[in-house]
Image (tube, helix red, strand yellow):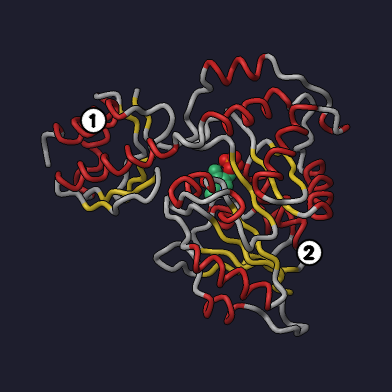
């Protein structure tokens, strides 16, 4: 099977499994797991934050971050298509009594500063207190422009807002831009990073921030059921991924570019990818038959009129060529 649905479908490599098997562990709720502690130190150092906390998932890391920035009746500004707003069941509202104020995106994936300015509520008894701006990078495979990031975070801080980055795929942005971790997250008070996406770990995310912020997040993590015990077996996978699976993200980006170019040659409407994720428009009349055809060729795709395709660690260039050939061989174009 060639699975192009998501970069979360990767299998841990032999090297990663060996690192997990030999990890030194302890009870992380007591802060006793040396491998978790090492992962947290390494990530805090690489990203230039005081502190870091390991989570089972990115959803929980984002939610704990929102809960640490905002209290009940506070509001956060967020993009309509942002993961924290749209793809986490509204957890901030449902579980934390934080009101989301969703805003339209710009084509680059950010939110226009004027739109943000207009959405910040004045101090008035009628309104929720606007506390936080949350952005996402990469978003839909797009990298936030660095100039925009600098201006929007400066603006948010000048308005007294905190800034959170859902950096589930920040390493794709780092590799794409050729910048270091610190500049990639400059301007954000907190950042959530997934180890289980392009980096290929079986589970795990980290939250980065100031020491006091992470102290709050550790309390919320426990309340949310994220206090794991001998979590070092998972943290070891993350440490292994940081060492072995970051630079190779460039291969995923090149594979996505080649795939998109090939689909374009078939006359399909494709936005050329910046990283490992892109979308192709499939004429509605072909959706059902094309899905069956691809399945018969061992290609897994979440096929729809707006189909997301994702490259990753477990898809080689040769497999991209096979997938392209399967699209070409679809008899009814
Ligand atoms: C996957 C993802 C998350 C959530 O991570 P999980 O580990 O699946 O809970 C958050 N934000 C973005 C942008 C993601 O892609």
Left or right: 157 with respect to 210? left
Please tell me the numbered disc located at residue 188.
none
Q: Could you classify mark 1 by the number of other residues whose Cα lies within 10 Å: few (under 14), some (14-19), or many (20 or more)? A: some
In front of the other: label 1 or label 2?
1
Q: In this figure, which residue is indicated by the disc labeled 2?
A: 72
Q: CA distance from mark 1 to mark 2?
A: 51 Å
Nearest the viewer among 297 and 272 is 272
Q: Seen in the image, is 241 located left or right of residue 302?
A: right
**Vertical arrangement, residue 76 with respect to residue 316, above or below:** below
Q: Position of residue 102 (x, y in %)?
A: 56, 67
Q: How many marks?
A: 2
- Answer few, some or many: residues within 10 Å of disc 2's Cα (few below 14, many 20 plus, some between 14 and 19): some
Name which of mark 1 and mark 2 comes first in the sequence: 2
* Ligand 1 sits in quadrant: top right
Tag 1, which secondary structure?
helix
When asked about the image quadrant of residue 153, the answer is bottom right
Q: Is label 1 in contact with label 2 (beta carbons under 8 Å)?
A: no
The residue under label 1 is 321
| Residue 260 percent location from the top left of the image | 26, 45
Give residue 73's quadrant in the image. Answer: bottom right
Residue ID at (27%, 26%):
318
């Amino acid at each position: 099977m060639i699975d192009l649905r998501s970069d979360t479908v990767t299998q841990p490599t032999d090297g990663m499994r060996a690192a997990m098997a030999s990890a030194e562990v302890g009870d992380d709720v007591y802060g006793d797991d040396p491998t978790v502690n090492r992962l947290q130190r390494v990530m805090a150092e690489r990203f230039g934050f005081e502190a870091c906390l390991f989570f089972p998932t990115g959803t929980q890391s984002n939610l704990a971050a929102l809960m640490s920035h905002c209290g009940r009746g506070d509001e956060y500004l967020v993009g309509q298509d942002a993961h924290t707003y749209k793809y986490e069941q509204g957890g901030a509202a449902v579980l934390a009594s934080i009101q989301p104020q969703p805003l339209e995106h710009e084509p680059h994936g950010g939110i226009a500063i004027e739109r943000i300015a207009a959405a910040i509520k004045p101090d008035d008894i009628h309104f929720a207190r606007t506390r936080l701006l949350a952005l996402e990078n990469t978003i839909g495979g797009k990298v936030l422009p660095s100039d925009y990031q600098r201006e929007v975070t400066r603006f948010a801080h000048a308005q007294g807002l905190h800034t959170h980055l859902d950096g589930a795929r920040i390493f794709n942005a780092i590799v794409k831009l050729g910048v270091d971790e610190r500049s990639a997250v400059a301007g954000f008070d907190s950042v959530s990073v997934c180890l289980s996406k392009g980096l290929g770990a079986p589970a795990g995310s980290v939250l980065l921030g100031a020491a006091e912020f992470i102290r709050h997040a550790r309390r919320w993590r426990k309340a949310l059921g994220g206090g794991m015990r001998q979590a070092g077996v998972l943290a070891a996978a993350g440490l292994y991924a940081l060492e072995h699976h970051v630079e190779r993200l460039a291969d995923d980006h090149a594979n996505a570019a080649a795939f998109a170019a090939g689909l374009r040659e078939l006359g399909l409407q494709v936005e050329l990818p910046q990283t490992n994720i892109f979308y192709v428009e499939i004429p509605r009349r072909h959706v059902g038959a094309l899905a069956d055809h691809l399945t018969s060729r061992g290609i897994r795709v979440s096929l729809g009129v707006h189909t997301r395709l994702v490259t990753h660690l477990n898809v080689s260039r040769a497999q991209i060529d096979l997938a392209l050939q399967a699209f070409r061989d679809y008899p009814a174009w």
